[in-house]
């Protein structure tokens, strides 16, 4: 989801599979707190006042919520929308101005069995039968932006450009190609007319070297390219993605990481430009019986310097000796606070009765040196 900082082309060039920090006692974490019970995929407004997230209701469907950061003004934007009564509304992203969001709406989640299995929504399958909608912060205006139809296409993980004038997403173009299909990176101009109705115009596609899964990570700071997670390498599994930089004016994708069988999909730059927060399955050892989150889905939150050095693990949800241990745990979507001294993360872990996994947004408070 969009971030507010500038960075140079070399910031991510040194990223490799994480290694232990030289001084494990030098953790920048002040505290880890369960912040929003039930919260899922999320974004933090650039103004710093609002969080947007999806949350499952009693029927298992996801709706879009926003709340003030003091948690005193939570409200659901989609719960009362009759047209979405059978759909998943999820994966919100704030426009830089803070007055509207783009959300991903998935039809037929019950038929897809995603209501019974939220773990499927941690994979690219969350894009199946999805469209992109615009919704204002008050939940009064809701506009369909895409019409991909019922031909097996799917849309995944929208991101606004830093200037707010373009929207980025990936679209599945071949449903029967590999485990998740073949994907194409798209962008379009985001325009709001005199009547206040938003539209996507001049949709563009960007060539990639091979059929692959492409998960957008956001625009580059100059808005002339994109960061993506993808499996472009020969024989690379769609479950072990690397990070690439793609320039919209052409050329081969620039490979930024070499996971070597690891899994580092989410990565976000801090507001100061000095650090990168990312999720990884590195250093997670052993398994526990009776866990509803499978071993392959386990992740933790990590931090590194912008040049790829000084990698430090911030969370230990998967470690039984830890005070924050939750058993098998997934850490996914994340967002920095605009000040840079907090990180909000989507966490999923197994329920005590072995039923539907639990979800929450956790807040990681960092030392003051991270403050912008």
Image: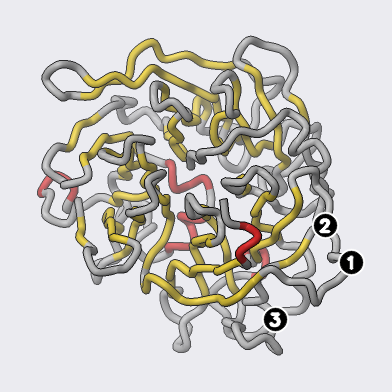
**Quadrant in which residue 202 is drawn:** top left
Above or below for 360 versus 265: below
Whether residue 268 is visible: no
Q: For numbered disc 2, what is the local secondary structure?
A: loop
Residue 84 seen: yes
C-alpha distance separating marks 3 and 1: 20 Å
Instruction: Give the labeled residue for mark 3.
Output: 319
For disc 1, the neighbor class at 10 Å (few under 14, some 14 to 19, many from 20) is few
- Residue topped by disc 1: 22
**Residue 43 locus on image (x, y percent):** 42, 50
Counting from the top left corner in percent of width and height, residue 274 is at 70, 47
Q: Residue at x 61, y 75 (%)?
A: 30
Q: Earlier in the sequence, mark 2 or mark 1?
A: 1
Residue depicted at 71% across the width and 62% down the height: 281
Q: Earlier in the sequence, mark 3 or mark 2?
A: 2
The residue under label 2 is: 310
Secondary structure at numbered mark 1? loop
How far apart are the two marked residues, 3 and 2, measured between alpha carbons? Answer: 21 Å
Identify which residue is drawn at 56% across, 37% down: 5
């Amino acid at each position: 989801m969009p971030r507010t900082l500038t960075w140079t082309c070399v910031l991510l060039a040194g990223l490799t599979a994480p290694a232990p920090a030289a001084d494990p006692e030098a953790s920048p974490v002040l505290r880890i707190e369960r912040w929003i019970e039930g919260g899922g995929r999320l974004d933090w407004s650039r103004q710093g006042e609002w969080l947007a997230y999806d949350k499952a209701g009693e029927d298992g469907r996801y709706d879009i919520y926003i709340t003030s950061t003091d948690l005193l003004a939570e409200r659901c934007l989609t719960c009362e929308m009759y047209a979405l009564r059978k759909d998943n509304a999820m994966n919100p992203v704030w426009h830089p101005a803070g007055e509207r969001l783009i959300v991903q709406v998935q039809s037929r989640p019950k038929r897809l069995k995603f209501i019974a299995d939220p773990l499927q929504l941690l994979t690219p399958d969350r894009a199946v039968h999805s469209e992109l909608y615009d919704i204002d912060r008050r939940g009064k205006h809701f506009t369909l932006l895409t019409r991909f139809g019922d031909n097996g296409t799917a849309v995944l993980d929208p991101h606004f450009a830093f200037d707010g004038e373009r929207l980025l997403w990936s679209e599945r173009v071949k449903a029967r190609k590999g485990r998740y299909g073949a994907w194409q990176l798209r962008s379009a101009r985001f325009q709001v007319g005199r009547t206040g109705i938003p539209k996507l115009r001049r949709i563009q596609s960007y060539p990639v070297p091979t059929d692959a899964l492409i998960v957008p990570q956001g625009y580059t700071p100059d808005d002339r390219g994109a960061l993506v997670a993808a499996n472009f390498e020969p024989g690379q599994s769609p479950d072990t993605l690397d990070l690439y930089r793609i320039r919209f004016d052409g050329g081969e994708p620039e490979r930024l990481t070499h996971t070597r069988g690891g899994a580092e999909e989410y990565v976000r730059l801090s507001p100061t430009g000095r650090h990168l927060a990312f999720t990884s399955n590195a250093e997670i050892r052993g398994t526990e019986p009776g866990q509803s989150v499978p071993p392959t889905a386990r992740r933790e939150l990590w931090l590194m310097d912008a040049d790829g050095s000084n990698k430090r693990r911030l969370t230990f949800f998967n470690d039984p000796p830890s005070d924050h241990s939750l058993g098998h745990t997934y850490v996914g979507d994340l967002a920095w606070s605009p000040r840079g001294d907090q990180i909000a993360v989507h966490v999923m872990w197994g329920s005590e009765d072995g039923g539907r996994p639990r979800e929450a947004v956790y807040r990681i408070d960092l030392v003051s040196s991270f403050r912008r």
